[in-house]
Amino acid sequence: MASRPISRKVLFPTRVALILVLPSLILYLFFNIWPMIFSIGVAFTNADRINILPNPEKIQDLKNAISCAEYLKTSTERREKAVDLLHRVDSILGSLEENLTEIKALLDTNSSWSQIEPYVNNVMRLSTKIKSIPAYVGEVFDCGKLGYPTKIVLIPGDILDKLNSLYTISSRIPMLYLANEASELYKDTTTGLNLTSEVRGFFNKLETNYEGYLDEVVKSNKEELDRLELKYVGFENFERLRRDPRFYNSLYKTLLFVATSVPLKVSVGVLLALFYSTPLIYGRKALRALLLVPWALPFLLSAMTWKFLSLPSGQMGKTLGININVNEWHAFLVYNLFEAWLAYPFIMTVTMGALSGISKDVIEASMIDGAGVRTRLFKVVFPLIAKPVTLAAILTTGASLQAFLVPLVINGAGPTGEIYVQGVGSTVGPKNEMLIVFGYNKIMIDWEYGYAASLYIVVILIILIYVSIWFIASRKMR
Amino acid sequence: MRYLSRREAISKTTAVILVVVIVVAAASAFILLRGGILPAGPSPAPTGYAQVTIGNVTLTVPASFAQFVEKAKKGEVSVKIYFGLAHSMEERPAFYSVINMFKNEYPGIDVAVSEYADWSTMQSKIIAVTTFPKDQRAAFIGQAPDVFSWAHDWIGGMADAEYIIALEDYIGTEAVSQISEYIIPVAMTAVTYRLKTYGLPYAGEALAIYVNTELVSTLPATFSDLKAIMEQFYKPAEGTYGIAGELAGMYHLNAWVTAFGGYFYDPALPPETRLAINSTQTKEGVKFFIRNVLRYMDVRDLSLVYQRKLFGDGKVPFYISGPWDIAYVKDKLGLGNFTVIPYPKIDDKTPRPWSGFRNLYISVMAEAGGIERTYASILLVLYMALNDNAIMEFVNRNGYVPVKTSVAAYVEAHTGENPLYDIIYGFYKQVLVTKPMPNDAAMQKVWGADTYFQALWSEYATALGEGLPEDQAAERAVSKVDDQLNAAQEEILGKLGS
């Protein structure tokens, strides 16, 4: 009995299809569009380590500190207490200034070293008192009690930095005294005096310009809040890229690496495939299998081996007389050799597959027709394996275009030196920095995520061009 | 039967409201009595200040903290905290040992050690949890460390982002001031950022000079002595050189530059003078280094591994490095065949390398899960940094250089008896003559200038490779110093401005 054909509607009910539309759109958005838009979007921002993922607690603390300062401006009670705060702070800073002045005067007059000692001890004692100033400010401007809990002290950032400098200098002065370092002691004393005077001047505002003091606090915290905000910067990152000699150098080195490494790895792979395909070599199957070892080895193991071999003290470094730490072209040569070593098993496998597909009849017929080895190779074998080898070459070009770990592990894409690009300018950086390494350094060392993202967009455009060529080439070959 | 009049009888609506009010009140009373809404923990909190003793240090702390310490000692509390460890494998057993000592003394506190492959993994964990609002972090307890140890120079960046907490916020300024009396000032200033103390240092590090005493019988007292010995050993054809040392950039150059009054970045100075990569004094120091030190080095490979091997193999009499190489040199030369001396004076000028301090940080995770976890984390930090026995464990097992004065005095007193103490004391003397590495976040940008210095070493090596004699090669590198340092200053200023 013939089975009844199942209706398409039974297999694919419309209502199920409709139900699946939404999740499929969400999944597509989540896995594809959203990360892409995010990555592209970052290239148009000032993203860095600080503003890309700020601590929400810090933001809240800043907002509370601003609100608290604004409220305090209206509080008469706190205004009165602020005068007491000023007296407390000023008594510390005033004492410090007096002692520093004495030390400076004694050093100016080349007085005996021991005369300085009591003042130095006083400075040491005062250094710990300087650290109490934020606590005093916190007691008077107690934002927590006012309903604005915050870890931020109501002292503007620059003044806090100066107070911290004063603390450091005051702690350092006794050490310099003990070490008989007169010139350093003089330098620190003078800096300390200038800082004390500036800070005292600012804290005087608590009495003379109470609102002005709090305005400074608000301004400082608003600036900090602004620093934590990710901002749209338009094409600024791309414009910077256009003026960056390191970018042009990395583009040049990447393209040069493609131009040198691809022919090298393809020719090595093809030659080895031809060599180990001849029946004249005994044990060629085992040898062929051994030649695939670079494929099987973990990359980092191979890379570390090549690194140590190619160092000036390594076997290859000594034999070839090369120094990858000093000479950029020596390092570039090693990258090429290593890349060829990594990629030849792939090319060799593809070529051997193509060779095995060539009929013996074709070879024999060409021999009967009088073709020599050279003619058979160039007129018969190569045309027959051209398509798969070209495809393999195109695929391996992608690897060279995205060279990253090879230069990074071998010598950090160095050596470091001056990079000069005519018409753009000069800078200093790793001379063999390929595009991907450049982006990596911008992220890992300089934390400039926005700038690195703009570079990677350029890399994507280059890869798109390459993929287009690949697409056109493969169509033509079909 | 008496009926309520309409005026006396309560309406249906009023009855419903009354019932709701009674139910809510009863429920609230029940929850309050069960402690469901009230915060857990001791109540009421003790007020005022009390004293606690950690090791030989007595501190005046808030009474609530002192009470917690007592309870932890008697095992009357049960708190679990997490200690993050990202040091090298060889260093880790000493931490386990110290943590066990702590747990024995404070049985109420359980410390779980979370091991990390490296610092950046540990830091990523902390950053990841802090992206959540404070009230949600309790769910992540154990997934990021409450207390962790790393060098002090990350304090600024981490404090700015509020990833770490300050001691003053919990134990007050008086206690911190008392602690300062027991720790060398340079170490205390290193862990202070914007007048708050972020954790405590328990060991110091600085570059100093390892001397192979098999090769050098009289230790150099001045730079002239050092140079004479370097000259004597510098025979590249025979594979021997004057001095070795890793050379990456500013960190390795700082001592020579400071001797001439220069510096790279000093956050203690006013903003307009903080960056001085291209100051005359800095340039002078760099030039001195190239002419008088670099020209006696094997510059074919300036990496740590290669340079220390030169010293380990007896190819150089001197090696500039920090305490992290004690174990390596001990293995290669044997304890007793080498010593460590501070940088010698150059005429009357004192070289001051940067110092780094191993710091015990308290992350914001310690604030999650109640005040007892915060107190337990602080107590662990105080114990590891102030208990002499704990510090001695680090000294003896890991060769750490103490920064607590009482431990340093003990090491000094026993220098003749234990060759390891001679070496540690050599580093200690150097640490006293240092400037702490800047701990503010801007320093991360300043490190970018290293590439300019590397270009100078490259210039020297290239000139040597071209066959120029050492002095001429050095002059070629020296001729590039002004331009390179001006360019470095300009680039870093641009970055700091941004």
Image (cartoon, coloured by chain):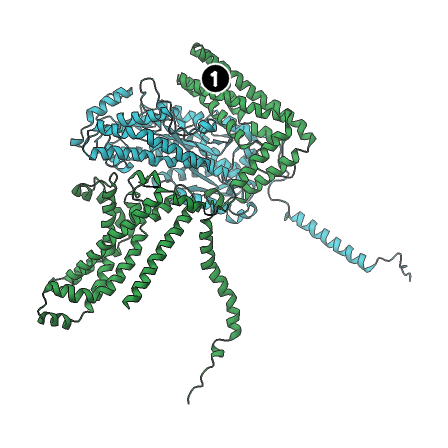
Chain colours: A green, B cyan
Residue B138, percent across and down? 53, 47
B42 horizontally vs A294: left or right? right
Q: Is residue A395 above or below residue A234?
A: below
Other-residue count near label 1 (Cα within 10 Å), few / some / many at <14 / 14–19 / ≥20: many
Query: Looking at this view, is A141 or B395 the one in front?
Result: A141
Residue A398, how many percent across, how many down?
31, 56
Q: Quadrant of residue A382?
A: bottom left
* Residue B188 in sight in this render: no
**Residue B260 in the image: x percent, y percent?**
35, 22
**Residue A433 horizontal side relative to residue A126, left or right:** left
- Which SS class for mark 1? helix
State left or right for residue B382 relative to residue B259.
right
The quadrant of the picture occupied by the C terminus of chain A is bottom left
Residue at the bottom extreme? A1
Foreground residue among B36 and A141:
A141
The residue pinned by badge 1 equals A120
Amino acid of disc 1: Val
Choose top left, top right, bottom left or bottom right for residue A4.
Answer: bottom left
At 28% from the left and 21% from the top, the residue drawn is B223
Q: Chain of mark 1?
A: A
- Image height of B423 relative to B26, above or below: above
Residue at position x 20%, y 35% in the image? B465
Q: How many marks?
A: 1
> Who is closer to the viewer here, A442 or B364?
A442
